[in-house]
Image: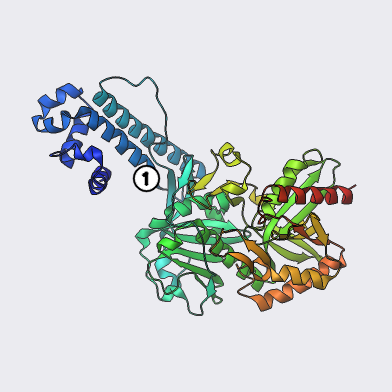
């Protein structure tokens, strides 16, 4: 099938190799490959004289075979193995590893035997490339409800474990997310069709919530990428319960594209995104899940935070938690990463609580925070040169040759991000004002509320927005949709922050200022380091 597909592609493109193969059919090439697994090149003619028109073009045949092998390796190749509830996770892991390794070796042997026979000599340099599959999935069907509305979602195969072969590189049809997710007031599941054979479900943890992510096979590459960003849920986590969040990614219908629905009767928050080329981007996977999580949080009196938070252990033994709020491209993560680099003489350890989205909540009349993701989905350009490639064995890359190229890197552990972390410093990330101040402080709570709620930033092109824009509370993933409820939460939590004399300010990353994209976050980080070390002295 792959051979026929590739030859048709080359013929449609009038490739120079196929122009030399006039009179050569697909079955002839296929038959020649089968014989080359057993016989030397010069013996094939005797076994099947009909192959002479192909065999006479030995050099072209070799070049075609190498290009066909490269074509195969550029395809997304996923393996699927049916697991069993009675087996342990270790058994699933062994099955995935053994099957994947055996198939990889089989493909390598196939390639080497055929190409060496065409070439007429042995290879003296052997490369053990990931030639079999990019990822292998252990799947198991699962049923979570008898409710008629959810009938079509029962007994779909659920991912139990994933094995990937790095480097894992995804080339998607889109490279940017645009627009907001909007609420609808009728359950999309009453109107859309689900072909169970075309979907695979990934059960994950978004913060403390369980999410079932139904992924259409056309978007399966984004499902694999979830394994680097969120904590997978084990079968024991959801065996006897319904999900908190339900996301169907890749439906045929467009009526409910980029919408969510609250099924308060079943206490399930549902998100839907259509199967269009514009939605073939990981941002639609990640941000819908976070929107559902944030809407759920607001409804349960917790405040979603679009920003970054780190736990800092200083060499003098003091511990501080810093939160930087800001929308996409504001420079929050870049500033905290710069702090890690320039503060190495003072900082013993820095651990990420959240890199993009977290939650504030009230406990014992104080403000605490926890994270949602164990990984970070970041722009390649925003990382130190070469950093992502140093982590190539753990990273998942998206369109590395394009503008807004992204990478997902594991940055924390689930047990750590869901702990109750106190808030010691809170800043708004300002990327558009060119000032050497580094940090200013809000003595007046009303000034702070105005800046944080206004959510100004200069859009860097990470979304469809351009120029100086505003987004309520710098968070279009929940607070914008439920502004009235969120307003009350923000006012209440900021009052508590000021009651406990928590430092609240604005940090100037200058990330959008021409020529300051690198040293802007560094200068801000220096001021932040001075503040932290002074406070902890």
Q: Residues within 10 Å of mark 1 (few under 14, many from 20)?
A: few
From the viewer's perspective, is residue 139 above or below residue 317?
below
- According to the picture, the residue beneath numbered tag 1 turns out to be 75
Q: Position of residue 138 (x, y in %)?
A: 44, 47
Residue 215, image x, y percentages: 44, 59
Quick one: which residue is furthest to the front in this view?
Answer: 514
Identify the residue shown where x is 26% and y is 29%. 114
> Is 102 left or right of 63, judged from the image as shown?
right
Q: Nearer the viewer, residue 157 or 466?
A: 466
Would you say 386 lies left or right of 280 here?
right
Residue sitting nearer the eye, 19 or 415:
19
- Spot occupied by residue 60 in the image (x, y as percentages of width and height): 23, 32
Q: Is the residue 389 above or below the residue 114 in the image?
A: below
> Which residue ends up furthest to the right in the rendered image?
537
Q: State the scheme by which the image is colored.
A: rainbow
Q: Which image quarter: residue 500?
A: bottom right
- Residue 113 x/y as whole percent: 29, 27
- Circle 1 — which element? loop
- At 64% from the left and 69% from the top, the residue drawn is 471
Q: Indicate left or right for 7 with 260 as reference.
A: left
Q: Is residue 26 visible?
A: yes
* Residue drawn at 41 percent across, 38 percent down: 100
Residue 465 is drawn in which quadrant?
A: bottom right
The mark tally for this picture is 1
Q: Nearer the viewer, residue 128 or 384?
A: 384
Q: Taking the image as drawn, is residue 87 in sight?
A: no
Q: Is residue 486 above or below residue 368?
A: below
């Amino acid at each position: 099938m792959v051979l026929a597909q590739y030859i048709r592609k080359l013929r449609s493109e009038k490739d120079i190799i196929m122009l030399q193969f006039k009179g050569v059919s697909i079955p002839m090439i296929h038959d020649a490959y089968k014989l080359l697994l057993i016989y030397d090149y010069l013996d094939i003619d005797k076994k099947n004289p009909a192959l002479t028109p192909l065999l006479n073009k030995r050099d072209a045949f070799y070049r075609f075979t190498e290009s066909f092998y490269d074509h195969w390796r550029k395809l997304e190749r996923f393996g699927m193995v049916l697991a069993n509830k009675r087996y342990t996770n270790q058994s699933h892991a062994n099955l995935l590893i053994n099957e994947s390794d055996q198939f990889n070796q089989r493909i390598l042997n196939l390639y080497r035997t055929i190409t060496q026979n065409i070439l007429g000599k042995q290879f003296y340099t052997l490369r053990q490339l990931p030639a079999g599959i990019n990822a292998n999935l252990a799947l198991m069907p699962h049923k979570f409800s008898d409710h008629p509305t959810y009938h079509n979602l029962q007994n779909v195969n659920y991912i139990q474990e994933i094995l990937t072969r790095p480097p894992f590189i995804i080339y998607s049809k889109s490279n940017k997310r645009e627009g907001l997710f909007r609420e609808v007031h009728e359950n999309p599941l009453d109107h859309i069709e689900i072909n169970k054979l075309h979907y695979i479900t990934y059960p994950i943890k978004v913060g403390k919530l369980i999410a079932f992510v139904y992924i259409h096979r056309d978007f399966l590459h984004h499902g694999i990428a979830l394994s680097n960003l969120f904590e997978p849920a084990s079968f024991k986590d959801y065996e006897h319960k319904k999900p908190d969040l339900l996301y169907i990614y890749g439906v045929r219908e467009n009526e409910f594209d980029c919408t969510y629905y609250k099924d308060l009767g079943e206490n399930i928050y549902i998100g839907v995104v259509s199967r269009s080329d514009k939605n073939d981007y990981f941002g639609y996977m990640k941000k819908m899940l976070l929107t559902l999580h944030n809407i759920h949080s607001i409804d349960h009196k917790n405040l979603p935070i679009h920003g970054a938070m780190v736990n800092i252990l200083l060499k003098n033994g003091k511990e501080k938690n810093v939160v930087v709020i800001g929308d996409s491209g504001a420079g929050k993560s870049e500033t905290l990463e710069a702090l890690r680099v320039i503060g190495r003489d003072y900082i013993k350890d820095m651990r990420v609580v959240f890199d993009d989205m977290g939650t504030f909540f009230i406990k014992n009349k104080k403000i605490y925070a926890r994270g949602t993701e164990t990984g970070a989905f970041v722009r390649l350009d925003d990382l130190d040169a070469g950093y992502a490639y140093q982590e190539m064995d753990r990273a998942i890359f998206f369109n590395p040759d394009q503008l807004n190229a992204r990478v997902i890197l594991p940055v924390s552990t689930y047990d750590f991000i869901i702990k109750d972390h106190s808030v010691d410093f809170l800043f708004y990330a300002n990327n558009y004002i060119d000032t050497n101040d580094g940090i200013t402080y809000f003595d007046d709570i009303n000034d702070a509320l105005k800046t944080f709620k206004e959510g100004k930033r200069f859009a860097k092109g990470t979304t469809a927005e351009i120029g100086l824009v505003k987004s309520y509370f710098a968070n279009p993933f929940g607070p914008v949709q439920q502004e009235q409820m969120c307003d009350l939460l923000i006012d209440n939590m900021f009052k508590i922050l000021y009651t406990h004399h928590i430092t609240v300010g604005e940090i100037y990353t200058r990330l959008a200022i021409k020529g300051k994209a690198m040293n802007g976050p560094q200068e801000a980080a220096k001021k932040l380091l001075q503040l932290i070390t002074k406070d902890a002295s």
